[in-house]
Image: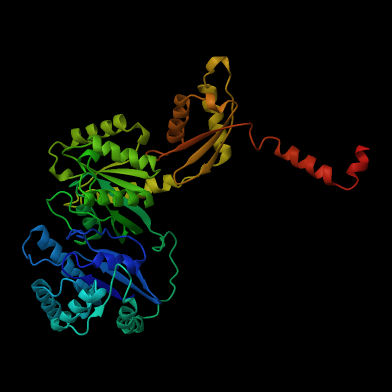
Amino acid sequence: MGLNVAIVGRPNVGKSTLFNRLVGKRLALVDDQPGVTRDLREGAARLADLRFTVIDTAGLEEATDDSLQGRMRKLTERAVGMADVSLFMVDARAGVTATDQVFAEILRRAGGAVILVANKAEGQAGSDGALEAYGLGLGDPVQISAEHGEGMQDLYTRLRPLVDAKEAEAEPQTDVDLEDGAVDPARPIQIAVIGRPNAGKSTLINKILGEDRLLTGPEAGITRDAISVNTIWGGRAFRIFDTAGMRKKARVHEKLEKLSVSDGLRATKFAEVVVLMIDVQSPFDQQDLRIADLAEREGRAVVFAVNKWDLEPNKSDKARELREALARLLPQLSGAPLVLVSGLTGAGLDKLNDAILDIYEKWNARIPTAKLNQWLTGEIAAHPPPAPGGRRLKLRYMTQAKTRPPGFVVFCSIPEALPTAYKRFLVNGLRRDFDLPGTPIRLFVRGGDNPYEGKKKRQANTLDKHRPGARRDRG
């Protein structure tokens, strides 16, 4: 287990900027306005030859009640308790504030290892402000510029002995043979939980994790970053992305919300399975349909999780209505699993886990070419393709070209003339007969004959042409 380093400090001192520099990617949202970060975000940090885990935290607020700021502070304090060392960051240009002094006292009482970091220390104004940091009683401040990368060598010098001590404490790990059927936790399934604001995404993930790892509350739009967490759920390794709620584009005006939505869209592209959260009190509105269509176009396997099921009084009729609405409104995801859950009570989580594993397997499915062509022959015999303009279309051969999602190629005599409706007919047939419900299917039509037809004959001709004495035989 490596060293855990939490970056803490009041809002807008540059914590997320330093986090991004240490992980080498722009994972955390950065903006000039304070309070951008709300959840804890972990990343694998690299500083020269040092390797450790870094945790980006919300800005420390003086609120201690159950307000949003108070809940953010509690989450940050929890991160300090989890970490081996805290990087307490102050703004050297602004100087030490009364809030900095309050939180310096809190960190002193906590008794953990603390490294004082004076950020934005470039230039004369920054140097003067860094001198004030000595008054906090937390030792010599490390003067850095997270934005420009200055002072990283000094930070390395302070972290080096802590990383070495942690590695010395760690017991050597021995290889353990996995039992038959066990899952290697090093290969997690990537899941993105997406949906409208206040659909209960973070609450559901916290219930899966078994702890209040993500910030939740009645306010809409609490989550801003696409936060990823690793967990073992139902005996299988998962990496779960919690994303910001996606409102209609016309309603998104603020720069920060646009960044949050973009971050969520990026998480969707990296995911393998998308869990679309539906609020049972307002299911399948236009925004839900747009999000589902986006996931299908990205080629992700989709599971619909209808949340707040504990609030529904007429469960039997409502379940039937929801499944009928899904089949009617999203035919491109026909048969996608719809699971009734409650993020608050944990009801339905086992069924959600089963649905994710099942559709993930189908998303990776590969169908033998012989079975595909046997199926294609039967489909053509039962429902021949139309003859546009009197031209007869011949579908000669079919093969699976890719998985994740399944993609198929059909060789057709006149590919451009094959109607879209017939392609849809073939896709629906594949989904029905090869048990691929809810999985995006890609069908490509190519011209030419079966590329494998006459393959043995061509190989024989080639060998005959190159055998000794072939030239004399032709003469």
Label total for image: 0
Q: In which quarter of the image is residue 305?
A: top left
Taking 388 as reference, is 264 left or right?
left
In the image, residue 170 sits, relative to residue 425, either above or below, namely: below
Q: Position of residue 120 (x, y in %)?
A: 24, 71
Q: In which quarter of the image is residue 137?
A: bottom left
Taking 279 as reference, is 230 left or right?
right
Between 190 and 177, the residue placed more toward the observer is 190
Taking 182 as reference, is 61 left or right?
left
In the image, residue 410 sits, relative to residue 351, either above or below, namely: above
Position of the N terminus by quadrant:
bottom left
Q: Residue at x 70, y 39 (%)?
A: 455
Position of the C terminus by quadrant:
top right
Of all residues, the one furthest to the top in this rendering is: 390
In the image, residue 319 sits, relative to residue 378, either above or below, namely: below
Q: Where is residue 444 in the image (x, y as percent from the top left)?
A: 51, 35
Q: Which residue is drawn at 24% across and 34% down?
A: 286
Between 432 and 5, the residue placed more toward the observer is 5
Q: Which residue is drawn at 22% across and 46% down?
A: 341
Taking 166 as reference, is 100 left or right?
left
